[in-house]
Amino acid sequence: MGTSSKRRGKQPWHAVSIIPRGNACEPVLALHERRFLSTEAPLLPLPDCPNPGGCRCIYRHFTERRAGPRRSFEESGIRGARPSAERRHGRGRRSSD
């Protein structure tokens, strides 16, 4: 087995996207913004490609499928403020509290 199979074993979320090059066909243009897990990515040239012998499209590799920050603090680096002390006090509103 080559090094690429070893690399996939260590990076279970390795992802790729398809980069259209040259005179790219419509099926590739429809998929070019999408990321796939590398094990689920379609093979190039795509089956619907009208010019499979001259296809110049390539894969762009990523360490994971996510494209950007998932939470607002990952984007800014600042977490929201948390109260330093418990502010609730006294009884509740119910008669059973």
Image (cartoon, grey):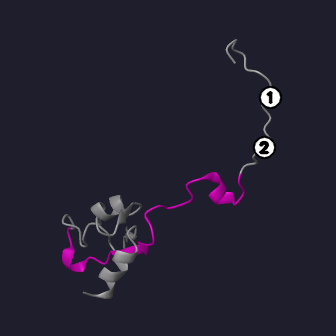
Q: Total marks drawn?
A: 2
Q: Which residue is mark 2?
A: 83
User: CA–CA distance between discs 2 and 1?
Assistant: 14 Å
Q: Amino acid at mark 2?
A: Pro
The single residue placed furthest to the bottom in the displayed view is 2
Q: Nearer the viewer, residue 76 or 93?
A: 93
Q: Does residue 65 sit above or below 3 in this rendering?
A: above
Secondary structure, mark 2, is: loop
**Residue beneath the point at 31% across and 64% down:** 28
Is residue 65 placed above or below 79 in the rendered structure? below
Residue 38 in the image, given as x and y percentages of width and height: 33, 69
Disc assigned to residue 89: 1
| Front position in the image: 47 or 13 | 13
If you read the primary sequence from the N terminus, does the residue marked by circle 2 or circle 1 appear first? 2
Indicate the secondary structure of the residue bearing disc 1: loop
Q: Quadrant of residue 29?
A: bottom left
Q: Are marks 2 and 1 in contact (CB under 8 Å)?
A: no
Quadrant of the drawing holding the N terminus: bottom left
The residue under the point 25% across, 73% down is 44
Q: In the image, which is nearer the foreground, mark 2 or mark 1?
A: 1
Residue 76 magenta: yes
Q: Quadrant of the C terminus?
A: top right
Residue name at image x 20 percent, y 74 percent: 52
Seen as rendered, the residue at the extreme top is: 95
Residue 64, quarter of the rendered image: bottom left
Residues in magenta, as a range: 50-79
Foreground: 36 or 71?
A: 71
Q: Can you give x and y, in whole percent of width and height, for residue 72 in the image? A: 63, 52
